[in-house]
Amino acid sequence: MYLTQGLHRAVQHHPDAVATVCAGRVRTHAESIDRIARLAAGLQVLGIRDGERAAILAFNSDRYHELLAATLWAGGAVVPVNLRWSVVEIADSLAEVDARVLVVDEAFAGHAEGLLDRHPGLAHVVHAGDGPSPDGTLGFEQLIADHQPVEDARRGDDHLAIVCYSGGTTGRSKGVMLSHANILTSTLGTLASGYAYPEGAACLHAAPMFHAAGLATWCAQLVRGGRQVMIPGFEPVAVLSAIAEHGVTDVVLVPTMVQLVVDHPRIGEFDLSSLERVLYAASPMSEVLLDRAMKALPNARFVQAYGMTELSPVATLLGSADHEHPAHRRSVGRAAPHAEVRIVGLDDVELPRGQAGEVVVRGGHVMRGYWDRPADTAEALRGGWMHTGDGGYMDDEGYIYLTDRIKDMVITGGENVYSVEVENVLCQHPAVAAAAVIGVPDNRWGERVHAVVVPATGQTVTLEELTDFCKERIAGYKTPRSLEVVETLPLSSAGKVLKRELRRPYWEGQERAVH
Amino acid sequence: MYLTQGLHRAVQHHPDAVATVCAGRVRTHAESIDRIARLAAGLQVLGIRDGERAAILAFNSDRYHELLAATLWAGGAVVPVNLRWSVVEIADSLAEVDARVLVVDEAFAGHAEGLLDRHPGLAHVVHAGDGPSPDGTLGFEQLIADHQPVEDARRGDDHLAIVCYSGGTTGRSKGVMLSHANILTSTLGTLASGYAYPEGAACLHAAPMFHAAGLATWCAQLVRGGRQVMIPGFEPVAVLSAIAEHGVTDVVLVPTMVQLVVDHPRIGEFDLSSLERVLYAASPMSEVLLDRAMKALPNARFVQAYGMTELSPVATLLGSADHEHPAHRRSVGRAAPHAEVRIVGLDDVELPRGQAGEVVVRGGHVMRGYWDRPADTAEALRGGWMHTGDGGYMDDEGYIYLTDRIKDMVITGGENVYSVEVENVLCQHPAVAAAAVIGVPDNRWGERVHAVVVPATGQTVTLEELTDFCKERIAGYKTPRSLEVVETLPLSSAGKVLKRELRRPYWEGQERAVH
């Protein structure tokens, strides 16, 4: 099984149907596959074949689609870079996977120099913009124009397809290695559910394509040979107008985005009748918001997916019918047609229904492992099960209710922020003695990053100072948005910070249904 | 990915829903999985683990389901035996794969002695009947009663799951080795099409479960956790009454069976309103019959699958909407969501649309190979594509029209008969000088096996004599049903028998849309 297979079907079944719509450019499958096969030839000349890595740092676009597909077509593996990362974070990850080629769009062209400084192994930077390519970079369009279409390498099965960096509990991100078989297992299983991306669907990429949810949508449409509509990034009016203009049927959003769309004052101006399905994932959605969203989009069915990058990414699905059920709608659904899910105790033994433990998952969609981290891989996959780090319980019909995130993280606007990473940075500040980072409720972001800090003797700290300090070192979305100064942190007998104690005042009376 | 995964989902999601219905026995998923886990424990004691082979020679039943599942649960591989084969054929195949355990039902218990004689490596015969087990055999029910449930071995991915014997062009059957990943690729891809086996489906096994089509249905319901209704074998009234009695929604039939059902004088006596889908496969269906069937079963959608055992087994699908199209309904559909299909010339280069060549297929569902036949495997899979031996062309929308079977075979009642195998037997008869076997049109079987024989000098041959001679050596369905005596066979310049010449008088004015 190989991810490029769907391209062959698309061009065989409906060559003249629309493959991509982006920024006024409309391309048929025949045109798109021709560009992909040419770009693949160019990438091969740059060394991308036999599993070599090409990375992409760009907003959503049709070229993003082409780069993903062309890298795989060439026989390489692709590294979609998190747009919010700092140059240092990106460079470290590209160096770790030894990426040879990096594609940047105009918005990120400025990063190239800093990345080359820190990762000299980066042999080529490709500029995917409409204007002329800056000195020292190759032109994306030129690369396509300069090469004849090459035959698909049809690399597949257990070969590496995508490396996605996700936050790690140790405070440093880990490269999740996903094979063609991993991703296609999740993709086919999700399609088999019948809940989303049917034949003839037109999907909107509003959530970032570098994210697991965006990639999953991309893969589903790749298999289906469906239409993909891209907007550079999430913006409520752009979403509304893309749906109306391009007859979008399926959209994937995180709940924060759902809220911004359905509460937007201009929503009534757009014809949203084409929208048949809203998939949401990566973050909790309150029942209040769900009700509001279902009212605002009466033609759409709501489907929830739960999973993680390490699961390629889908583990469970909550179908639209389940959303009508008073209890099930609070769950993340149940095992998808390609997954086995269990709740286990600390001893990894399955727990009785109703009892909370850790969610573990098994199946062909479980990642190959973390890049160059055999110990972390063995720990995460012990006993053959992916340990999600999410706490939850299962009811008598297999529905899973998440109760807590075992791994210590904050989910803000759909992004995972590992507390320890932020704490490490805070503790580097000379005025900080100790720091604990927690997620607290936030109307806009679901949770926000909240810092609890013990100042060093005789020092004072301010939120502004700490924020500036963090922003130089980590992505903006990871920096604390609120601060609490305390004399001491509550500690357990084992000396661990009792984060539950810190969270309590903020979460009292609210269920932290984080996932 | 492992085939037993669906059992875990079924018992997790709806333990009290009906899993199997057979001969008055109704078992829930909880009951069924308990039996499977116990039977697996028994099979492990008999040596079935780590890929060791257990075979089954039995009519369709809930026990057939349990044996398939339990063998995989134990970590073994299963060999479903063709019921029409002679003892010699069966023994040879079981010896080749070194099957240690054979499960027989009451109907086939008489075969055991002869099989043990020819394959002494067969360590255990298990009797899957309601009555007492004959001497020297183990009781299926006893095996379940005597063991505690064992943990699922969860053997999967590229490990061997099923060995299916299919006819070979060399005249001897070949063991097609299918891995868990092969079968699940075809299963998930077929489910992803949305054409059949939706959530909540109840499938009827009327076609034999040892066949690729029956196994595909079984796998689909295994993944879905759906209901499986078994009748021992195909009989029109039994089919009609099972549909009516058990609310069957999906049934897989070969066209011969469709004809016998829809033309049955008693069809009006049964409530067939539950039947939502009829899948047909393995044999051509004339447009006349299709029209008649669609009229007789107005609630049902018709779906065609084309493939072969080597493709686990689905390559293309023709959805119900395609059946409304005047041209597409004559095709076998187009590439399923897990398959890539091409038409190539003798040089294996892809041909332009509309030009007839050989159908070749690529994807994760292509078999691992033929048991112990590396040369045949390499030949069949040359260039990474499974060469189906079927001739056909593709239209501009990817629909495939079969024109001829490149491999020389007769398809009679859904069974493949390789001409050379029958010719080899005929030529052993002292009165036969030369023989050619072709398929000729037959109202009941679609095609029948027809022998064209050149008698040895001074000898005469009769159909009865040749039939008796063949029946001692090969399965009844392979023996010629009509005979033509000629002085010479028409030969090509290369000395090959021109079968087209032999076929012409029988097929004049009819399209032999064999597949």
Image (cartoon, coloured by chain):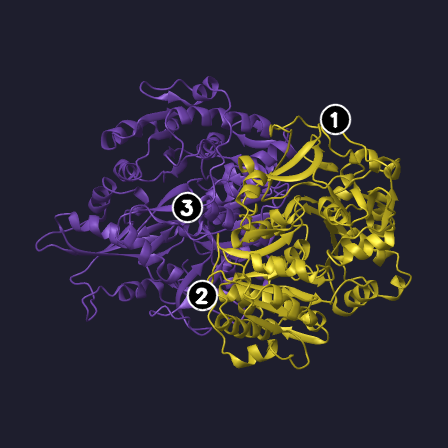
Chain colours: A purple, B yellow
The answer to the question of whether label 3 and label 1 lie on touching residues, with beta carbons closer than 8 A, is: no
Discs 1 and 2 carry the same chain letter: no
Q: How crowded is the residue under tag 3: few (<14 C-alpha within 10 Å), some, or many (20+)?
A: many
Nearer to the camera, A482 or B498: B498
Q: CA distance from mark 1 to mark 2?
A: 67 Å
Residue B493, given in percent of the width and then of the height, sits at 74, 26
Mark toward the viewer: 2 or 3:
3
Q: Position of residue B177 (x, y in %)?
A: 56, 52
Q: Nearer the viewer, residue A23 or A389?
A: A389
Residue type beneath disc 2: Arg
Where disc 2 sits, the SS reads strand
Q: Check disc 1 and give the amino acid type.
A: Ser
Q: Chain of mark 1?
A: B
- Residue at 65% x, 47% y: name it: B168
In this rendering, does residue B295 appear at all?
no
Name the residue carrying label 3.
Answer: A178
Chain under numbered label 3: A
- Residue at mark 1: B493
Residue at position x 40%, y 70% from top? A356
